[in-house]
Image: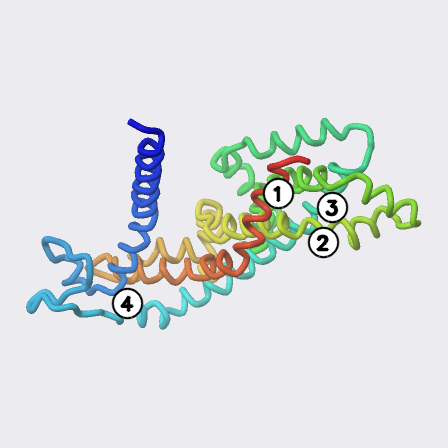
Amino acid sequence: MTSKTKHRISRILLWVLIVVMTIWMLFPFYWAINSSFKSEAQLAMMPTTFVPRDPVTNEVSVYTLNYEAVFTNEAFLRAIVNSVIVAGTVTFLALAIGAFAGFALGKLRYRGKDATLYVILAMTMFPAIAVLTGLYAIITNLGIPPIASMIITYLLFSLPFTAWVLTAFFRELPTEIFQSAQVDGATPFQTFYMIMLPLTAPALVTTGLLAFIGAWNEYLFALTFTSIAPDARTLPVIIANFPSQYSMQIPFGEIMAAGIISSIPLIIMVFVFQRRIVAGLTAGAVKG
């Protein structure tokens, strides 16, 4: 077998693997879309269909009442607002505080910097369930509202990750830039805000998007903190509680429709910031 033939076979196998992995990752999302356009009778059809079909005529029949039911559900609409407030606030605070921490840990010299980095890294190792009871007791005793309690809790998990990642990005920036700014009379804050921060835009977008996704999709703490405050529930909790809002049946179609709607903002953000996300993920991968 010639080297040219081996190269061709390897490329074919690579593309086969890419196609298989693409189908593997996208099929659950496609199935959710397919199910969201089916009625209860269509969902109960055996064998199941890969497109919505009428149970009697077997013709393609799209059922849109699931989305109408979701958009007319006041609890769901309120949950969208709550999720935007919580995820947006968490992302803003995580980036604002994490950028300061990343700059200090990556470029400034002070005693105890290594110990600080290890403490930040250690904070990311605790599983959420391990601190749930203690956090709930503290928040209950302090009387913190559910929205604020979710923001504070999510920051405990997103901020260490954001600070750690941004520290690596600030550390990769040339030290000569920092030194030149000092020679020109810039204060450390001016150097950070006017010079260093714009250079880390890809890193800010990448870490900010990850923080937003984490806060947007979080379920465990949101369920716990809003157990006695239904008006403060976020999208994951509302979607999980859809069955309790109906009697005699589980509304799988409405649940799928709500899940698709809640995924749209994340998909839009990824498409809008995809170039900066790629730049942020690959920055610092090659030196020289």
Q: Is residue 138 visible?
A: no
Q: Earlier in the sequence, mark 1 or mark 2?
A: 2
Inter-mark Cα distance, 1 to 2: 14 Å
Query: Which amino acid is tagged 1?
Result: Ala
- The answer to whether mark 3 and mark 4 are in CB contact below 8 A is no
Q: Residue at x 25, y 60 (%)?
A: 34
Give the image location of residue 2, x and y in percent: 32, 28
Element assignment for label 3:
helix
Of circles 3 and 1, the one toward us is 1
Residue 150, numbered circle: none
Q: Do labels 1 and 2 touch, CB within 8 Å?
A: no
Q: Nearer the viewer, mark 4 or mark 2?
A: 2
Residue at numbered disc 3? 100
Q: Tell me if mark 4 has few (under 14), some (14-19) or many (20+) residues whose alpha carbon lies within 10 angstroms of its own.
A: many
> Do labels 3 and 1 touch, CB within 8 Å?
no
Q: Amino acid at mark 4?
A: Asn
Label 3 to label 2, Cα distance in Å? 13 Å
Q: Quadrant of the C terminus?
A: top right
